[in-house]
């Protein structure tokens, strides 16, 4: 997928990739959705990204998406109100956000898959409404919003939505492939 560079493209990509993710999930039986990931050691050895070992099941993936929505929403709301906060909350930063992701999983060990689905659907809706509230210029023109630094708000939105949904689809597809062996 081409990375969105306009508001229209961002909204389209966000909705399309979210829909694709749910189509994949809905293609799985309830048992498959609740089965822990069992990626082979051979598969995991070929993957350098920590998320392949971090996320143990579908709930962990959905919670990860929800929590990144929360990061985006909190960052935007705070900065709009004049309270400057970084996107990655302290004590984390862009070098240590891997630990933040681990902490998200730990935080939600008692969250059910059903609840994770509800949280994600709700936060997706909130993010979609937030994106709609900005102009194309506010989303994709550099230096339009002082708190986005050298990037654009749209770039953060793409990362927390359509790009993240594609990442989740890869994990779900791999689980489906593993289950069908």
Image (cartoon, grey):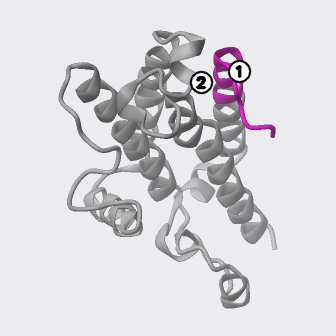
Q: Earlier in the sequence, mark 1 or mark 2?
A: 1
* Residue located 68% across and 64% down the image: 175
Separation (CA) of disc 1 from disc 2: 15 Å
Compare residues 157 and 30 and report the one nearer the observer: 157
State which quadrant residue 180 falls in. bottom right
Whole-percent x and y of residue 170? 71, 56
Q: Residue 105, position in %: x, y?
A: 36, 62
Tell me: residue 42, above or below residue 86: below
The picture places residue 97, in percent across and down from the top left corner, at 38, 63
Badge 1: residue crowd in 10 Å (few <14, some 14–19, many ≥20):
some
Mark 2 falls on what kind of element? Answer: helix
Which dot marks residue 12? 1
User: For numbered disc 1, what is the local secondary structure?
Assistant: helix
* Residue, disc 2: 140
Q: Is residue 132 left or right of residue 108?
A: right
The quadrant in which the C terminus is found is: bottom right
Q: Is residue 34 above or below residue 41?
A: above
Residue shown at the point (63%, 80%) measured from the top left? 48
* Residues drawn in magenta: 1-14
Q: Nearer the viewer, residue 20 or 12?
A: 12
Looking at the image, residue 168 lies above or below residue 127: below
């Amino acid at each position: 997928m081409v990375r969105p560079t306009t508001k229209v493209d961002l909204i389209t990509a966000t909705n399309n990739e979210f829909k694709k993710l749910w189509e994949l999930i809905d293609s799985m039986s309830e048992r498959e959705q609740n089965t822990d990931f069992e990626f082979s050691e051979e598969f995991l050895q070929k993957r350098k990204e920590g998320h392949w070992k971090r996320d143990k099941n579908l709930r962990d993936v959905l919670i990860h998406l929800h929590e990144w929505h929360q990061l985006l929403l909190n960052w935007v709301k705070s900065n709009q109100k004049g309270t400057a906060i970084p996107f990655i909350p302290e004590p984390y930063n862009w070098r240590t956000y891997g630990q933040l992701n681990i902490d998200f999983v730990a935080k939600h060990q008692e969250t059910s898959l059903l609840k994770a689905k509800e949280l994600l659907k709700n936060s997706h809706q909130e993010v979609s409404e937030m994106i709609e509230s900005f102009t194309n210029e506010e989303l994709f023109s550099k230096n339009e919003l002082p708190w986005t630094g050298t990037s654009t708000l749209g770039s953060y939105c793409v990362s927390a939505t359509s790009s993240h949904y594609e990442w989740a689809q890869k994990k779900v597809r791999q689980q489906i492939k593993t289950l069908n062996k």
